[in-house]
Amino acid sequence: AQTVTQSQPEMSVQEAETVTLSCTYDTSESDYYLFWYKQPPSRQMILVIRQEAYKQQNATENRFSVNFQKAAKSFSLKISDSQLGDAAMYFCAYRRGGTASKLTFGTGTRLQVTL
Amino acid sequence: EAGVAQSPRYKIIEKRQSVAFWCNPISGHATLYWYQQILGQGPKLLIQFQNNGVVDDSQLPKDRFSAERLKGVDSTLKIQPAKLEDSAVYLCASSTGSNQPQHFGDGTRLSIL
């Protein structure tokens, strides 16, 4: 079974600084997708960034980028120029490739952004 | 584009009572998901529909949980009877297809007394 591990329950970053959230996963599949979701206090889960396992290039979305290390099964999220609005729970998630769509989530990292 | 709508937003019941949640996915989204998010944990898939058919309900406690999507649009999730461990946020999500990005609703927070 696939598992997703987020070892940092809480992280804190100062406004305008950079922070990295860690995620590791375990799978025997070669075709899969990895995601980072943001869940603000209002609870609506929002997709931040997505990475296809077959792509070597790390995904980037504006201030958000990932460091995908396939051999190490590591998928970290870097947030640059942190803003107050980045404060939220961040969940790493895995989905097997093909027609499967079940998302397996980690336990989340709560990010605080301070002035 | 209107998002995924869920109701109620909050629900408090006593154990052994019944409760139902409603979800209206984004228009045109064929795939609908129900997740359970227990405090301090990530969401866990309970059931996935493709139109009005069940694709995956392997983690649904079928002795007390049921879900339906009769016309392939709205969906209801029911718990009968509720247990203390069912206290959680129940999230509904939808997507255009089984391997497309999932869009989540605000969730229903269920508290069991």
Image: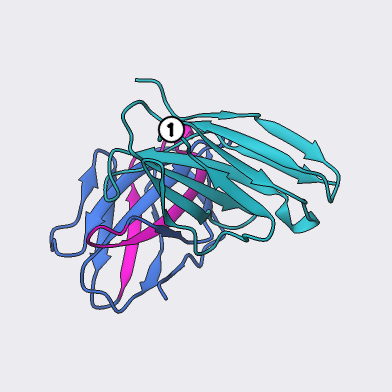
Chain colours: A blue, B cyan
Residue at screen point 31% across, 73% down:
A73
Q: Is residue A91 magenta?
A: yes
In the image, the segment drawn in magenta is: A73-100
Q: Please, which residue is most extreme toward the front here? A: B70
Who is closer to the viewer here, B39 or B74?
B74
Compared with B66, B13 (above or below) is above
Can I make out residue B28 in this image? yes
> How far across and down, in percent of the image, does residue B80 sit?
74, 49
Disc 1 residue type (three-letter): Lys
Residue at screen point 34% across, 20% down:
B1
Q: Which residue, given by chain and number where applicable, does mark 1 sit on?
A: B71
Q: Quadrant of the N terminus of chain A?
A: bottom left
Q: Quadrant of residue A33?
A: bottom left
> How far across and down, in percent of the image, does residue A15 sit?
45, 38
Q: Is residue A77 magenta?
A: yes
Q: Relative to residue A8, is residue B16 drawn left or right?
A: right
> How far across and down, in percent of the image, does residue A24 sit?
39, 70
Who is closer to the viewer here, B94 or A85?
B94
Q: Relative to residue B15, is residue B89 drawn left or right?
A: left
